[in-house]
């Protein structure tokens, strides 16, 4: 019973774990063929090579750098190609406070990114203004006043593991996106 | 002025904007650069892309609270920023931290300095085209972060220093962990030299680039390694000792080069001095309370108080004006990066545009500290 | 030079100066018109030789603005604080010390931006931190802002 139970768990995990290729490979003598859905395979490819834009305004950017180093190593999840230009980026990690003067710049960077594009709001400042909520005259109280946000991470600053978690959450989100099929309303 | 606007002046100078979103500015700094061919004629910094009104906020926070906002100012020297504020309040109250707290503060401050210089070294390598130093430096930086986390509960913005001492006692493992980190740094330090310092391409990018003379460095108000590389003796730990730095043996690293290479060498040597300082203290942390007793609501007497400390980037001054209430009447931060930034137009004049990256890499700016 | 000697020498230069010795450093309080001549003397005279302006800021006392200059001499290792009182809060102005210490240029931009003090003979006076069309000077005590959420 117990052994069977464990096997069941592994099987369930394998179906849950979308890191495996979404589809069935049928081997034939002349090379085999593949049965899958175009939506699934496109989303699978996109979610595993998200290129973030290097966009750090303050403290959270240091934790973002920590996530890139050998200890946390975000390249395990396909994020290591950090781009300095928005035209080559799929994802913008807003790490740090956004102030009124920076807001138009962030909007322009977001507009310059090619579709489909995603936003991670990293840290308390980008969620609500965080420590700079009260009695400040120049801070934007939440980055979602400027651009739409896909994943929020709380923390001041969040740990690198939290950033990795948010990235995996974003991958999950992308895998369930309709690409060809119509979105359910 | 529009962002990204480029044009040619009547004299045929080409004007470009570097930043506010540029990887080599380490944040959101915006430099307007006038170029003749590739030669820089003039640089004008435009700031405020991360101006978070910390000084206005501080006027409505109590003397216990305003300390913690400063961790977000120069986040790479978070401990030392907290220390400056705590010392300023202590100066107003005319109390002193307990001997145990002072020793813990100094160890934490020097660990912060080490971590900060390691991050600078990683970024200097990245800016000038080498990715590998990043992984070497972060190996040690993460070890320091783990020590911080164990005692303070946070990796980056620790909020550990409070007026009167520190927030809680050190973790039982602290001394052992710190010694392990120091050993790791000393064992691995030769790798830093092998991979970057000895590299001829790297040296040529820094030598004779971004020269600033001793007189100019003083006039522009440069402090920290930037000024010490020009031969200005400005180490606050030596000149105006605080928290028991006067009882410790260490050297103020001075160089007379004045160029980017000298700034690089000064920072590298400072790391070893920090290791030396911690080694003197780590086995001699006095027993006793970790914080002096203070009232719950702190009220400073009327007057102004100025406290300076040496952060990893230079002299941080906290200027507090009190009118006797429970919140500061005015709080101003004399930021080391702000003064160092004002010298960049002088350093960059006549250099090539590619050299501006080398200059900014060795001055080591933290933009939220400039904008505050 | 000790504080007493500094005080004696400055009184010779500027009899109208007030002194405040309650704080850590010797503080000289002068009217804003007398700032530039005094500062020039403090920088150029061999016995003063204040070559390092390490803190420049302003304090709003509601009925007047107080410019605060912290000066240090690297050669003699003495410190002085010069406070210049600006009585006109509607249209405050003062001479720039940018020609004496170069670090003053950006610091005066900052004070102009946040307090609205106009610096005469400043080469490039501009809003440093806020947008050019920002209304008001945020570090003034009477500043109001509809976006600001009071605790």
Image (cartoon, helix red, strand yellow):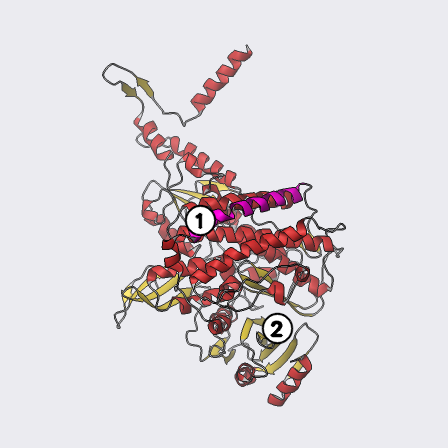
The part of the chain drawn in magenta is B173-197
Residue B46, magenta (yes or no): no
Pointer 2: what residue? Answer: C61
**Residue B233, percent from left and from top:** 55, 68
**Helix, strand or loop for disc 2:** loop
Circle 2 crowding by C-alpha within 10 Å: few under 14, some 14–19, many from 20: few
- Asked if C18 appears above or below C56 in the picture, the reply is below
Relative horizontal placement of residue B132, taking residue B313 as reference (left or right): left
- Residue at horizontal 73 percent and vertical 51 percent from the top: B290
Question: Mark 2 against mark 1, which lies toward the viewer?
Answer: 1
- Residue at horizontal 47 percent and vertical 45 percent from the top: B136
Residue B183, magenta (yes or no): yes
Taking depth in this image into account, of A156 and B96 the one nearest to the observer is B96
**Residue A128, percent from left and from top:** 52, 48
Circle 1 crowding by C-alpha within 10 Å: few under 14, some 14–19, many from 20: few
Relative horizontal placement of residue B74, taking residue B21 as reference (left or right): right
Task: Kindly report the distance in space between the C-alpha atoms of the residues bearing marks 2 and 1.
Answer: 57 Å
Q: Chain of mark 1?
A: B
The label on residue B194 is 1
């Amino acid at each position: 019973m117990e052994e069977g139970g464990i096997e069941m768990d592994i099987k369930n995990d394998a179906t849950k774990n979308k890191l495996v290729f979404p589809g069935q490979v049928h081997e034939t003598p002349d090379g085999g063929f593949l049965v899958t859905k175009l939506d699934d395979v496109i989303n699978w490819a996109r979610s595993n090579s998200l290129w973030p834009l290097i966009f750090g305004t303050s403290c959270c950017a240091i934790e973002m750098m920590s996530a890139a180093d050998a200890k946390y190593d975000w390249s395990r999840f396909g994020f290591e190609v950090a781009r300095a230009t928005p035209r080559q980026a799929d994802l913008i990690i807003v790490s740090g406070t956004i102030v009124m003067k920076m807001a138009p710049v962030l909007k322009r960077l977001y507009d310059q990114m090619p579709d489909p594009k995603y936003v991670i709001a990293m840290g308390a400042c980008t969620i609500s203004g965080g420590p700079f909520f009260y009695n400040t005259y120049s801070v934007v109280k939440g980055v979602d006043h400027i651009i739409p946000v896909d994943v929020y991470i709380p923390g001041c600053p969040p740990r690198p593991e939290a950033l990795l978690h948010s990235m995996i959450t974003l991958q999950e989100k992308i895998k369930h996106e309709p690409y060809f099929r119509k979105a359910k309303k | 002025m529009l962002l990204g606007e480029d044009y040619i002046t009547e004299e045929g100078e080409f004007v470009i904007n570097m930043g506010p979103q540029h990887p080599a500015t380490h944040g959101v700094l915006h430099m307007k650069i006038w170029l003749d061919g590739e030669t820089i004629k003039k640089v004008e910094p435009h700031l405020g892309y991360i101006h978070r009104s910390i000084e206005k906020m501080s006027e409505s926070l109590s003397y216990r609270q305003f300390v913690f906002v400063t961790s977000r100012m120069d986040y790479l020297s978070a401990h030392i920023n907290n220390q400056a504020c705590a010392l300023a309040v202590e100066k107003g109250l005319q109390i002193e931290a307990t001997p145990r707290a002072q020793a813990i503060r100094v160890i934490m401050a020097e660990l912060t300095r080490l971590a900060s210089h390691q991050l600078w070294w990683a970024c200097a390598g990245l800016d000038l085209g080498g990715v590998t130093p990043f992984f070497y430096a972060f190996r040690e930086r993460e070890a320091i972060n783990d020590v911080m986390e164990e005692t303070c509960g946070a990796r980056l913005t620790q909020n550990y220093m409070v007026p009167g001492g520190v927030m809680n006692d050190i973790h039982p493992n602290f001394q052992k962990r710190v010694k392990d980190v120091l050993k790791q740094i000393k064992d691995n330090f030769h790798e830093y030299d092998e991979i970057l310092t000895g590299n001829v391409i790297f040296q040529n990018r820094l030598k004779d680039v971004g020269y600033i003379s001793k007189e100019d460095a003083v006039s522009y108000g440069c402090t920290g390694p930037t000024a010490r590389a020009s031969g200005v003796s400005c180490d606050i730990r030596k000149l105006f000792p605080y928290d028991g730095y006067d009882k410790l043996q260490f050297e103020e690293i001075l160089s007379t080069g004045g160029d980017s290479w000298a700034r690089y060498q000064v920072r590298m040597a400072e790391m070893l001095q920090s290791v030396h300082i911690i080694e003197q203290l780590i086995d001699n942390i006095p027993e006793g309370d970790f914080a002096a007793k203070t009232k719950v609501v702190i009220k400073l007497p009327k007057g102004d108080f100025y406290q300076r400390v040496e952060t990893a980037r230079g002299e941080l001054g906290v200027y507090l004006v009190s009118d006797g209430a429970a919140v500061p009447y005015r709080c101003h931060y004399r930021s080391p990066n702000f003064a160092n930034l004002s010298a960049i137009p002088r350093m960059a004049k006549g250099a090539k545009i590619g050299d501006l990256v080398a200059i900014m890499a060795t001055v080591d700016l933290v933009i939220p500290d400039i904008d505050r | 030079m000790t504080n007493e000697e500094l005080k004696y020498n400055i009184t010779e230069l500027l009899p109208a100066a007030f002194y405040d010795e309650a704080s850590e450093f010797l503080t000289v309080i002068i009217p804003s018109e007398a700032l530039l001549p005094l500062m020039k003397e403090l920088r150029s005279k061999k016995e003063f030789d204040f070559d390092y302006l390490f803190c420049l800021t302003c304090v709003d006392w509601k009925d007047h603005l107080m410019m605060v200059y912290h000066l240090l001499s690297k050669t003699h290792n003495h410190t002085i604080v010069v406070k210049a009182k600006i009585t006109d809060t509607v249209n405050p102005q003062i001479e720039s010390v940018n020609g004496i210490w170069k670090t003053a240029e950006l610091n005066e931009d900052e004070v102009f931006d946040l307090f609205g003090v106009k610096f005469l003979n400043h080469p490039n006076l501009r809003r440093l931190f806020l947008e050019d069309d920002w209304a008001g000077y945020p570090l003034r005590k009477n500043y109001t802002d509809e976006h600001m959420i009071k605790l």
